[in-house]
Image (cartoon, rainbow, N blue to C red):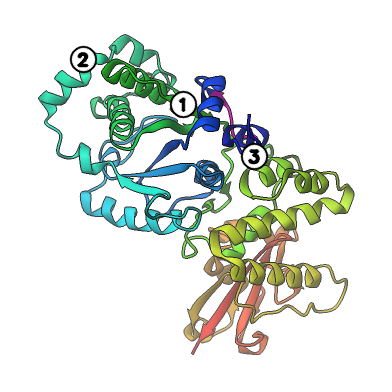
Amino acid sequence: MSINNPYQILLERGFVYQCTDEEGLSRIFDKEKVTAYIGFDATADSLHVGSLIPIMALAWLQKTGHRPIAIVGGGTTMVGDPSGKTEARQLLSRDDIRRNMEGLKKQLSRYLEFGPDQALMVDNGDWLLGLNYIDFLREIGRYFSVNRMLAAESYKQRLETGLTFIEFNYMLLQSYDFLVLYQNYGNKLQMGGQDQWGNIVAGIDLIRRVTGGQAYGLTFPLLEDPRTGSKFGKTHAGAVWLDPEKTTPYDFYQFWRNTDDQLVERCLKLFTFLPLDQVRELNALEGAGINQAKEMLAYEATKLTHGREEAEKARQAAKGLFAAAGEVGGEDEFPVSSEAIPSTEISAEVLARPANVLDLLVLSGLVKSKGEARKLIRGGGANVNGRLVDQEERSYNRADLKDGAFLLRAGKKRYHRLIIKD
């Protein structure tokens, strides 16, 4: 096996959960330039951190000289994948899907080099939306056993809560995608999350039945936050998005900086291109040294998604804030004007009369309600411009502004700047 064999790299870095034929896949990677694909349905105008494992897998393929294909599902999004869902997805309009696809294409270009003889981006709407239903059933549907489909984990989970007929068709459509890519692009490998196993195997079987050819499948492990048991990439505020308008580069950096100690090594392997020797050195750090590993993870992950400049700004802002927060006694000197800190502009009318701290905390988005703000204050976790807030009745006026803003902190690490717009 070649040291640049991407299967070996993916295996060593923790990407592999299941593979249909490990030896066969390794062999073709050594013998030829392999084309492989992953599908991304356009259910939103941005991908999120949960999408990064498949994206990084495609990037490793390209780095080792193979050809990745990213399908942006203009066709399958019209149906909705039931895999890993407890209820049916909301069906989107064609216009919504087109808008979402534009956002996804822009983000994928951060990780993959698209162009002639490089990575490809294709829309499965090109071949799915014009299908004749009766012809499709006769030519493709006849290869599928309903009994085998219902045995697939993605369908079994949904039978208890309700599986719509439109969702039931999803496996056929995804399998057909694999067949089209196999025939038109020589695509021999499909990758996806572990909940995609049934769909991937069905596509391999369809290729064998229709063409007599051999294809392969690989799935990635589910990454969970050990503190909550939830899917990795979720926070108190919801999903961590790749779009800087939805999750600022600073918040993105902080998400990685706050990674649970147990996940740091796995995340360095999965979400950065750092050599494994360096990953092992970082993971060997003990005590306070683990923060160095987390800072490296945060910087590298932010650099990949938002660029070196934004990563550096986020790192410097975080260092300034942590240094200030660590001071004992007196008023902390926070870098209130730092552009990297998440900010919101609010009208000067808010200060027409003294503004209550509960209102400021809600306006910042650090809490969702005044009740949550009260809990934060009672727990000693609220801070405005470097001073602990210990009274729920505390109010602020223009004299309390620093450089025309309030800097609020919830807990030890979540910051937001409220800029007063005159």
CB under 8 Å between callouts 1 and 2?
Answer: no
Dot 2: element: helix
**Residue 153, percent from left and from top:** 44, 19
Question: Looking at the picture, which amino acid does disc 1 mark?
Answer: Gly
**Residue 344 visible in this rendered orientation of the protein:** yes
Instruction: Classify 10 Å Cα crowding around label 2: few (below 14), some (14-19), many (20 and above).
Output: few
Residue 332 position by quadrant: bottom right
How far is the residue under mark 2 from the one under mark 3? 42 Å
Q: Nearer the viewer, residue 400 or 108?
A: 108
Label 1 or label 3, whichever lies nearer to me, is 1
**Residue 84, percent from left and from top:** 45, 30
Dot 1: element: strand
CB under 8 Å between callouts 2 and 3?
Answer: no
Name which of mark 1 and mark 3 comes first in the sequence.
1
Quadrant of the image containing the N terminus = top right
Name which of mark 1 and mark 2 comes first in the sequence.
2
Residue at the location (27% across, 45% down)?
Answer: 74
Q: Nearer the viewer, residue 11 or 161?
A: 11
Q: Nearer the viewer, residue 26 or 130?
A: 26
Residue 217's tag is 1
Query: Disc 2 marks which residue?
Result: 142
**Residue 157, percent from left and from top:** 43, 21
Query: Disc 3 marks which residue?
Result: 225
Label 1 or label 2, whichever lies nearer to me, is 1
How far is the residue under mark 1 from the one under mark 2? 22 Å
Question: Looking at the picture, which amino acid does disc 3 mark?
Answer: Asp
**Residue 194 visible in this rendered orientation of the protein:** no
Residue at the location (49% across, 50% down)?
Answer: 48
